[in-house]
């Protein structure tokens, strides 16, 4: 049984171009999708529900994501009132693959090569869904990315490898990974 961990992905209100390249913290949150290993459940949070998400994050052993360290947590931190996300244990799939490969790969590349299923859209699509009030499409897109991230992680953990496409998209490549769940804390008494 995996430790009490979640998979997280979020969508933004703005593009980097719209904030003048100032950084992810300026992009704003529309929705945050999560998968909770405990209970095997997906939960979506809208901007006005971030306090509830903050409470949940404070209780987990680890947060799993794809580019979560440099993107999702940077966008989300300004909304946090009680926790510093940099102090939360994470496993960033993209960071690990970049360390192993020497270059970045996209979730689309890894998911389509590993799972034979691609993303259901793009971050720009998500911003358009938000701006046009298509909240159900936005939520579905975000949760689709959460599901892909979780399934890529589980595949790598179980098989010791994942796949990705070469930069030109012509060749499927393999990379060995050593992904593991953290050990659940043990409660014991000295008496």
Image (cartoon, rainbow, N blue to C red):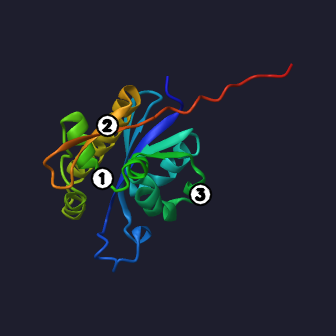
What residue lies at 40% left-to-right and 45% top-to-bottom? 93
Name the residue carrying label 3: 84
Give the SS element for disc 1. Answer: loop
Q: Position of residue 189 (x, y in %)?
A: 80, 22
Q: Position of residue 3 (x, y in %)?
A: 53, 30
Q: Nearer the viewer, residue 106 or 122?
A: 106
Q: Disc 3 versus disc 1: distance between alpha carbons?
A: 27 Å
Q: Which of the marked residues, 3 or 1, is nearer the chain's N terminus? A: 3
Residue 45's disc number: none
What separation in Å lies between label 2 and label 1 (alpha carbons)?
12 Å
- The front one of 115 and 38 is 115
Tell me how far mark 3 sits from mark 2, CA to CA: 31 Å
The residue tagged 1 is: 105
Contact check, label 2 and label 1, Cβ < 8 Å: no
Say whether disc 2 or disc 1 marks the residue closer to the N-terminus: 1
Q: Nearer the viewer, mark 3 or mark 2?
A: 2
Q: Judge left or right: residue 22 versus residue 144.
A: right
For the residue labelled by badge 3, is the local secondary structure a helix, a strand or a loop? loop
Q: Is residue 88 left or right of residue 105?
A: right
In the rendered image, residue 136, in percent from the top left (x then y), is placed at 23, 48
Q: Nearer the viewer, mark 3 or mark 1?
A: 1
Looking at the image, residue 14 sits to the left or right of residue 4; the answer is left
Tell me the crowding category of disc 1: few under 14, some 14 to 19, or many 20 or more residues within 10 angstroms, Cα based. many
Q: Looking at the figure, which quarter contains the C terminus? A: top right
Depicted 134 relative to depicted 140: above or below:
below
| Label 2 Cα neighbours within 10 Å, binned few <14 / some 14-19 / many ≥20 | many
Asked if labels 1 and 3 touch by Cβ distance under 8 angstroms, the answer is no
- Pick whichever of labels 3 and 2 is earlier in the sequence: 3
The mark found on residue 162 in the picture is: 2
Q: Is residue 164 visible?
A: yes
């Amino acid at each position: 049984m995996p430790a009490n961990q979640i998979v997280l992905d979020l969508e933004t209100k703005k593009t980097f171009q719209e904030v003048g390249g100032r950084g992810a913290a300026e992009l704003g949150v529309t929705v945050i999708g999560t998968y909770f290993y405990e209970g095997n459940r997906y939960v979506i949070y809208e901007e006005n529900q971030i306090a509830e998400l903050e409470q949940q994050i404070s209780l987990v052993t680890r947060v799993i994501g794809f580019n979560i360290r440099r993107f999702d947590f940077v966008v989300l931190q300004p909304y946090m009132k009680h926790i510093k996300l940099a102090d939360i244990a994470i496993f960033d799939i993209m960071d690990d693959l970049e360390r192993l490969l020497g270059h970045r790969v996209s979730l689309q590349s890894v998911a389509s090569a590993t799972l034979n299923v691609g993303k259901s859209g793009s971050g720009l699509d998500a911003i358009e869904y938000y701006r046009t009030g298509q909240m159900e499409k936005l939520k579905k897109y975000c949760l689709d990315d959460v599901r892909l991230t979780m399934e890529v992680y589980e595949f790598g953990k179980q098989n010791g490898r994942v796949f990705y496409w070469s930069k030109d998209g012509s060749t499927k490549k393999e990379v060995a990974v050593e992904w593991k769940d953290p050990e659940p804390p043990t409660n014991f008494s000295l008496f």
